């Protein structure tokens, strides 16, 4: 292995919990331990002989920008003969197109350029980097974010709240120190729909995503409506470890919807009342018309048709005779 032959040293590297990559002075890889292969998602044959100029490698700096080749830690060590300590970098390569984040330490061994090696150690910080990257976004979003443990969701102990963001503190009045360790049920009250709570519990038991609109109460007992989307969070072993609830205050729209529904209900009742009133007035007018006709055409004492009734009926018969061309006899 080009001078790396000490068996004890090799055994130490083989079982190390950090990735170890040894480059020739031309940056080609001459050794990589099993942890390094796993971190870079390569097999041994894919790694040995590959140099940093290989087009399959893409390095990214801590801000997420593509790193210039001359800024690669291996090249920095080669050009300055100085160590690179705790350099955060992202690597895209191997069998995955996702970014893997590492803390890299690089230094050189040897005194002759032809026999110098550059030793790189890699510590996986992907989980921590992702947490740092998303923390500011989650903390400052306008939606409320609540993260709970998934170990125990049963009433009354769980699920335990382990994180809330600023938006949650502002709306509910609870500080993070007051609410962490409590269960989200502390926000619920007598008017919180039990059917919605049961649907949420059932989804959490099955480790499934669920969306509900729920009535909650702040620290002063003031009710407010939230539309919440609860999603399970998994670790690298595909195990559900936490639940994240993204909540939005929909009190205003809920109030407006209720007001609109009430107004529509009132308008509907008003329409029904008007229709009933029109029917009543129409019936009254028909009765009045009948009474007026009776007064006009019948003698009030004997109820016998009078002269006006006779004239009206004659006129009707004459007009009918004219239209149909028939005779009229008296």
Image: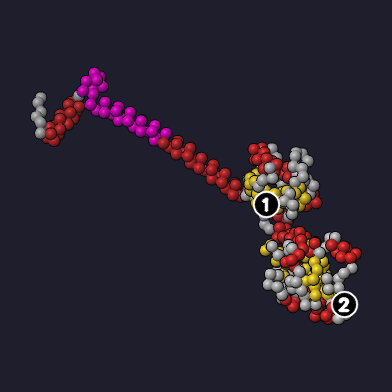
Q: Quadrant of residue 293?
A: top left
Residue at image position (87%, 62%) is 11
* Along the viewing direction, whichever of 11 and 82 lies nearer the viewer: 11
Principal SS element in the magenta part? helix
Residue at image position (78%, 65%) is 102
Badge 1 density bin: few <14, some 14–19, many ≥20, Cα 10 Å: some
Give the vertical position of 291 relative to 217 (above or below). Answer: above
Query: Can the viewer see residue 200?
Result: no
Q: Quadrant of residue 17?
A: bottom right
User: Which residue was labeled with disc 2?
Assistant: 110
Magenta stretch in the rendered image: 276-305
**Which numbered disc flags the more N-terminal residue, 2 or 1?**
2
Q: Is residue 186 left or right of residue 211?
A: right
* Along the viewing direction, whichever of 36 and 310 lies nearer the viewer: 36
User: Which residue was labeled with disc 1?
Assistant: 246
Label 1, secondary structure: give it: strand
């Amino acid at each position: 292995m080009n001078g790396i032959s000490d068996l004890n040293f090799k055994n130490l590297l083989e079982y190390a919990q950090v990735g170890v990559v040894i480059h020739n002075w031309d940056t080609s890889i001459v050794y990589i331990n099993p942890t390094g292969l796993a971190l870079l998602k390569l097999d041994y044959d894919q790694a040995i002989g590959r140099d940093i100029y290989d087009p399959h490698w893409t390095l990214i700096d801590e801000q997420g920008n593509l790193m210039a080749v001359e800024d690669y830690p291996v090249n920095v060590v080669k050009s300055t003969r100085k160590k690179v300590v705790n350099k955060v970098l992202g690597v895209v390569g191997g069998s995955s197109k996702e970014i893997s984040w590492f803390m890299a330490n690089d230094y050189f061994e040897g005194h002759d350029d032809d026999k110098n090696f550059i030793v790189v150690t890699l510590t996986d910080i992907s989980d921590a980097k992702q947490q740092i990257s998303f923390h500011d976004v989650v903390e400052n979003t306008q939606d409320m974010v609540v993260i709970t443990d998934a170990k125990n969701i049963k009433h009354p102990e769980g699920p335990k709240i382990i994180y809330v963001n600023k938006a949650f503190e502002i709306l509910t009045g609870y500080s993070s120190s007051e609410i962490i360790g409590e269960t989200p049920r502390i926000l619920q009250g007598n008017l919180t729909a039990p059917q919605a709570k049961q649907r949420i519990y059932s989804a959490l038991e099955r480790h499934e995503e669920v969306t509900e609109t729920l009535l909650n109460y702040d620290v002063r007992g003031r009710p407010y409506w939230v539309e919440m989307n609860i999603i399970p969070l998994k670790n690298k072993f595909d195990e559900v470890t936490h639940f994240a609830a993204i909540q939005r205050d929909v009190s205003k729209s809920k109030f407006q919807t209720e007001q609109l529904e009430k107004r529509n209900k009132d308008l509907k009742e008003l329409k029904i009342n008007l229709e009933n009133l029109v029917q009543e007035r129409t019936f009254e007018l028909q009765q009045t018309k009948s009474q007026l006709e009776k007064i006009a055409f019948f003698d009030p004492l004997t109820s016998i048709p009078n002269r006006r009734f006779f004239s009206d009926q004659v006129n009707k018969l004459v007009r009918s005779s004219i239209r149909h061309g028939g005779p009229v006899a008296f």
